[in-house]
Image: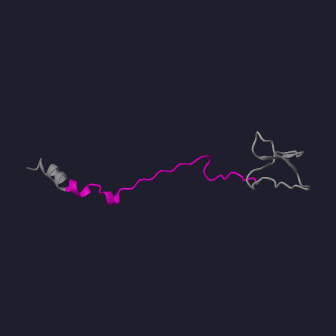
Amino acid sequence: MRKFMPYLMLVLLAPVSQAYASNVGFSIGINFGVPGVVAPVYAPQPVAIEEPSVFIDPPELGFYVAAGLPYDLFFVGNLF
């Protein structure tokens, strides 16, 4: 009987140690880069237009294009 006593205790205590849905957790962590180091954020330089631009409307494009500027500027549906 003494040989079976540890097995009997294991069978009796096994249901107590079961995990239930109320005490089970799940977590995922995803990190990119070196932890604790924050990359600098650079704001783009504002664009200042000193004179009104001349816009042309090429029919093959379907929107207005500014002419004579050192950068690309488009006008579509009240948005530049």
Q: Residue furthest bottom?
A: 22
Which residue is rendered at x = 47% and y = 50% of the image?
A: 28
The picture places residue 33, in percent across and down from the top left corner, at 62, 46
Which residue is rendered at x = 39% and y = 56% of the image?
A: 25
Q: Residue furthest top?
A: 60
Residue closest to the eye, 5 or 26: 26
Task: Tally the numbered discs.
Answer: 0
Give the residues in magenta: 13-42
Provide the major secondary structure of the magenta segment: loop
Which residue is rendered at x = 80% and y = 42% of the image?
A: 58
Q: From the viewer's perspective, is 66 left or right of 34?
A: right
The picture places residue 50, in percent across and down from the top left corner, at 91, 56
Q: Residue furthest left?
A: 1
Q: From the viewer's perspective, is 5 left or right of 33?
A: left
The picture places residue 48, in percent across and down from the top left corner, at 86, 56
Residue closest to the eye, 44 or 75: 75
Q: Is residue 71 magenta?
A: no
The picture places residue 26, in percent across and down from the top left corner, at 41, 53
Q: From the viewer's perspective, is 65 left or right of 51?
A: left
Q: Residue furthest front?
A: 59
Which residue is rendered at x = 60% and y = 50% of the image?
A: 35
